Amino acid sequence: MKLGGFVIALETQRMNVATARFTYWREDDGKYLGYLNEFPDHWTQGESLEDLKAHLRDLWELFSDEDLAGVRRESELEFA
């Protein structure tokens, strides 16, 4: 019984995880540049891919928590 509850808890936890697509590349000097696909005007860099991902997480948190002027957003329309 406990194992079953544990699996359910893990599935619930997975459903609450947010994801964001990003684009990145490595420069000749070894640094990584990238941006969140939803916010392509706002690039960041990192010493490694993991460092870049940390900076991208910071951007995502900032942009998702605040309605910042000048930040272009991507959305979707539904048509009947």
Image (spheres, rainbow, N blue to C red):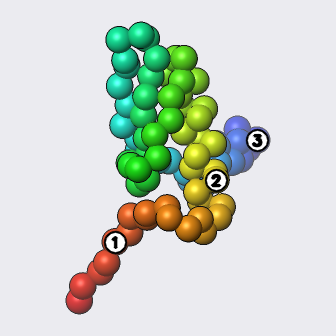
Q: Is residue 76 visible?
A: yes
Question: To which residue does mark 2 refer?
Answer: 62
In this picture, is 13 found above or below 43? below
In this picture, is 30 found above or below 4? above
Question: Of callouts 3 and 1, which one flags the residue occurring earlier in the amino acid sequence?
Answer: 3
Residue at image x 63%, y 51%?
A: 61
Q: Nearer the viewer, residue 71 or 24?
A: 71
Q: Please state which amino acid type lies under the numbered disc 3.
A: Lys
In this picture, is 35 found above or below 15? above
Which of the two discs, 1 and 2, sits closer to the camera? 2
Which of the two discs, 3 and 2, sits closer to the camera? 2
Contact (CB < 8 A) between labels 3 and 2? no
Question: Of callouts 3 and 2, which one flags the residue occurring earlier in the amino acid sequence?
Answer: 3
Residue at image x 50%, y 35%?
A: 44
Question: To which residue does mark 1 refer?
Answer: 76
Single out the residue that lies furthest toward the right: 2
Pinpoint residue 31: horizontal percent, then vertical percent: 46, 17
Q: State which quadrant residue 30 falls in.
A: top left
- The number of discs equals 3
Element class at badge 2: helix
Measured in 3D between alpha carbons, the distance from the residue under mark 1 to the one under mark 2, in whole angstroms, is 21 Å
What crowding class fits label 1: few (fewer than 14 Cα within 10 Å), some (14-19), or many (20 or more)?
few
What crowding class fits label 2: few (fewer than 14 Cα within 10 Å), some (14-19), or many (20 or more)?
few
Which of the two discs, 3 and 1, sits closer to the camera? 1
Pinpoint residue 66: horizontal percent, then vertical percent: 65, 64
Measured in 3D between alpha carbons, the distance from the residue under mark 3 to the one under mark 2, in whole angstroms, is 38 Å
Measured in 3D between alpha carbons, the distance from the residue under mark 3 to the one under mark 1, in whole angstroms, is 41 Å
Residue at image x 51%, y 28%?
A: 45
Single out the residue that lies furthest toward the bottom: 80
Question: To which residue does mark 3 refer?
Answer: 2
